[in-house]
Amino acid sequence: MKLYKNLYKISILLLTFPTFQLRTFFNLLKFFRRNLVILTLFFCLHFINATPAVAANLSSDLLKQPATEIKVSLGNAANELKFEPNHLEFETGKRYNLRLTNSSQLKHYFTAKDFADAIWTQKVEAGKVEIKGAIHEVELKPGAEAEWVFVPLKSGNYSLRCPIAGHTEAGMIGEIVISN
């Protein structure tokens, strides 16, 4: 607001004193504009730099806590189409290592997209491969194992299923609950 008042005063001076040099007026405008740009950049950089620092501190704290191991079997040696256990419970802010195994002769999926959207995934490890970033489902071929390390962020009830034709219908479904 002060900037506008000063510009208003300068315009009045310009109109009332024809001898007032136009160059002085434009120099003053450059001065105000440069200071406004510098001030804007300062605030933008301040807020941009604050966010990654907070996120970095949060993720390093989460990585320091030990992961609670939860084992889930996709199918079994008798080729039954089910998750064991089919009800999983997690708490927000805690680190988990979900160990998935497939001891059946069929491939299966651990699909829970809404659940995957409600967590922060540190990694998924299978064999000698480690995947980082957002994961929405994990496919396990017969005899395969995988570890999914994550931290739940959003509480809620989420459905779990194996989307292979006939598997969901045969009962290969489950529920995942994230509480505060």
Image: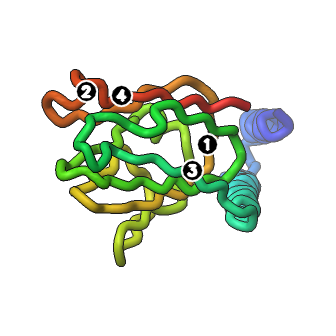
The residue that appears at 56% across and 53% down in the rendered structure is 150
Q: Marks 1 and 4, Cα distance to the nearest angstrom?
A: 20 Å
Report the residue that reaches farthest toward the bottom.
128
* Contact (Cβ within 8 Å) of mark 1 with mark 4: no
Q: Residues within 10 Å of mark 2 (few under 14, many from 20)?
A: some
Q: Marks 3 and 2, Cα distance to the nearest angstrom?
A: 22 Å
Q: Looking at the rendering, which quadrant does residue 82 occupy?
A: top left
Name the residue that disc number 4 marks: 173
Q: What element does badge 1 sit on?
A: strand
The residue that appears at 69% across and 38% down in the rendered structure is 91
Which sits earlier in the primary sequence, circle 4 or circle 3? Answer: 3
Asked whether 147 or 42 is in front, the reply is 147
Asked whether 93 or 57 is in front, the reply is 93
Name the residue that disc number 3 marks: 70
Q: What element does badge 2 sit on?
A: loop
Q: Looking at the rendering, which quadrant does residue 126 occupy?
A: bottom left
Q: Is any part of residue 139 visible from this angle?
A: yes
Q: What element does badge 3 sit on?
A: strand
* Contact (Cβ within 8 Å) of mark 1 with mark 3: no
Name the residue that disc number 2 marks: 168
Q: Is any part of residue 52 visible from this angle?
A: no
